[in-house]
Image: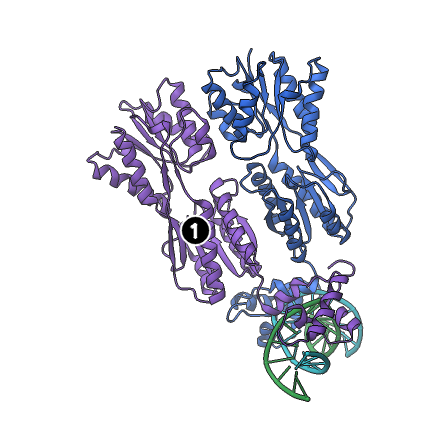
Chain colours: A blue, B purple, C green, D cyan
Amino acid sequence: MSKSDSTIRDIARTLGISKSTVSRALNNHYDVSQETARKVKELALKMDYQPNILARQLKLQRTNTLGVIIPETINRFFAKAVGGIQEVANSAGYNVMICQSNETLTLEQNNLQTLMSSKVDGLLVSVSRQTDRSDHFQYAINKDIPLVFFDRILEELAVSQVYSDNFDISFQGTEHLIQQGCKRIAFVAGPSHLFNSRNRLNGYLEALKANNIPVVESLIVQANYQAGHVQQYTRYLFDAKEKPDGIFAINDISALEMMHILKMKGLHIPRDVAVLGFNNEVICDFVEPTLSSIEHPAFDMGVAATRILLKQISSKEFTQQKELIKSRLVVRESSRRY
Amino acid sequence: MSKSDSTIRDIARTLGISKSTVSRALNNHYDVSQETARKVKELALKMDYQPNILARQLKLQRTNTLGVIIPETINRFFAKAVGGIQEVANSAGYNVMICQSNETLTLEQNNLQTLMSSKVDGLLVSVSRQTDRSDHFQYAINKDIPLVFFDRILEELAVSQVYSDNFDISFQGTEHLIQQGCKRIAFVAGPSHLFNSRNRLNGYLEALKANNIPVVESLIVQANYQAGHVQQYTRYLFDAKEKPDGIFAINDISALEMMHILKMKGLHIPRDVAVLGFNNEVICDFVEPTLSSIEHPAFDMGVAATRILLKQISSKEFTQQKELIKSRLVVRESSRRY
DNA sequence: ATGAAAGCGCTAACAG
DNA sequence: CTGTTAGCGCTTTCAT
């Protein structure tokens, strides 16, 4: 509160009426005379009155703030999701407090603590890459704080979740590569404790099975997201006697890095190796060859999750709700052979 | 507040002491007996006591929250800056509330209003592309809310600012192109009411002058950031009789889009046209040719701005402070001719 | 239609 | 070292 912010008390005093009446007038309460209401609002405007949110929050035990925990803002997927969250939240009169776990469990736990102690009215969460337990979230649930997961969900918790069909899209992507004539498709997998990673891997495996293509263990590598790792597993895959003729990468940037390495090796894409990325970044259209990828409606997921959360907050009804947001395969030159 | 959160009152009652003593014990106040302090903390732990931040905030008139207004989180520069902000803020016990202006003045004004009414302790701002006035910020300043601008600053306001040397780096980048033999360097300019855009343009102009290269108006285009616009001005530049032999793009993505178009036209980069981007995205290393660019230490700018803000908050001393964060030219294949 | 009064949970000045 | 008291600014019940 700076020097001389005016309060309802000031307004009441100068108008010679009570605080309660002023409060009622300002909140458009029904039983307050038109005349008084007018005078109050007029003076409020003149005095540049701004309600003290802190006082109201304490009284109402409600902050009109949503807490968001995401892995990283520099991850474009989450940056876009945040856009959707903020749009819905703001237009419903809610503020948003964003925390980043930096892909670590520890920070995720801290963030949750922070947001809970800030008394947010609800939580929107996409778990970190490390998260292999759910007790911290169970704690929040026990405290009756509405919680909605999106994208990186924790299936074992009975809360609402907005997710994308990682199994389906991965099946579809793999089958696309097969249709382009690939027989040995390298697959870059994410951490196996993540629901999404498991589904993606399963989609790949099922697609191979459905098309009678043998699963070759050495074609499946595990990304560890460390610097230089893309280069490392690309070498591993392509220094083998039998090289891959297709790649299902873990994201677009790493797909481009792999392509870059392969082109240096003199391999032609897609003729020698067909490549499929993940995330459909803008850049996919501006590289040579243009990069096939998978588009996730990040913004829409943010929107959907927030809508569910707001509904739960206002209805105080926390029954589990699951919403599927469909992903889409975008075929470009890097995987088109015919 | 959920069902049955315990308060200092509960602790006081079960321990048969007063609320004030409990409060003091919990806040590690000096004059409270070791014994009492121990008992209080023990019970607090057992009862899973969580202080009600809302009450404390109302009492202290302080939220321990910083408000941040940035154009967009999907802009990687700002996403990184936010990382720096959060790191410093969190480790100082502050929360961060992030708002996006979506590059519009109207939303920026709304955001400011929201953050002020949320009683944030201070503000970190990078203005929108549209912002050509400063009265809304002046309003906040008049209310004694500490404010620090970073990157996209408003020079006319006497508040602290963290900025990068857009003039210098632009001069340097242009001179680099000249040294590579470019005589007709196309320049993509940003909105002229932005301090950064003006400086960048001036750096370009001065570098030409310093090297006795005539300024050609038709080589300077104004980006409007609309879909298809990059394609439009690239055509404009290269359908002319005298084509550019160098490009200083407005960011890396648009540089890549331009390169993509030029390659389709059969032009060789850097031989026919040398290209310099802006932002030094990861992708610069994975395209062909690799893209020369300019690196802005976004994270560091966030860190610096937050440090200044926190100092001002704690010292209540708002004298203007200016901090320059140096950018760096990263030369890669797209602009290297020798 | 309005006012008086209580209270949200905490901190801090003052008194002892 | 501890307790009493007041108060942050607002909403809301209960009277009138």
Question: In this rendering, is residue A30 above or below B305?
Answer: below
Q: Position of residue A262 (x, y in %)?
A: 49, 20
B108 or B85, which is in the foreground?
Answer: B85
At x 56% / y 22%, what residue is drawn? A236
Total marks shown come to 1
Q: Pointer 1: residues within 10 angstroms few (<14), some, or many (20+)?
A: many
Q: Position of residue B280 (x, y in %)?
A: 42, 36
Which residue position is annotated with label 1? B150
Quadrant where the C terminus of chain A lies? top right
B141 or B17, which is in the foreground?
Answer: B17
Question: Quarter-wise, where is residue B294 in the image?
Answer: top left
Q: Is residue A164 left or right of residue B245?
A: right
Q: Is residue A14 left or right of residue A325?
A: left
Q: Position of residue A309 (x, y in %)?
A: 70, 46
Question: In this rendering, is residue A154 above or below A115?
Answer: above
Quadrant where the N terminus of chain A lies? bottom right
At x 26% / y 32%, what residue is drawn? B178
Question: Quarter-wise, where is residue B200 in the image?
Answer: top left
Task: Let me know if residue A32 appears in the view.
Answer: no
Secondary element at image label 1? strand
Which chain is home to disc 1? B
Q: Amino acid at mark 1?
A: Phe
Question: In this rendering, is residue A223 above or below B9?
Answer: above
Task: Let me know if residue A166 appears in the view.
Answer: yes
B303 or B216, which is in the foreground?
Answer: B303
Q: Position of residue B229 (x, y in %)?
A: 42, 31
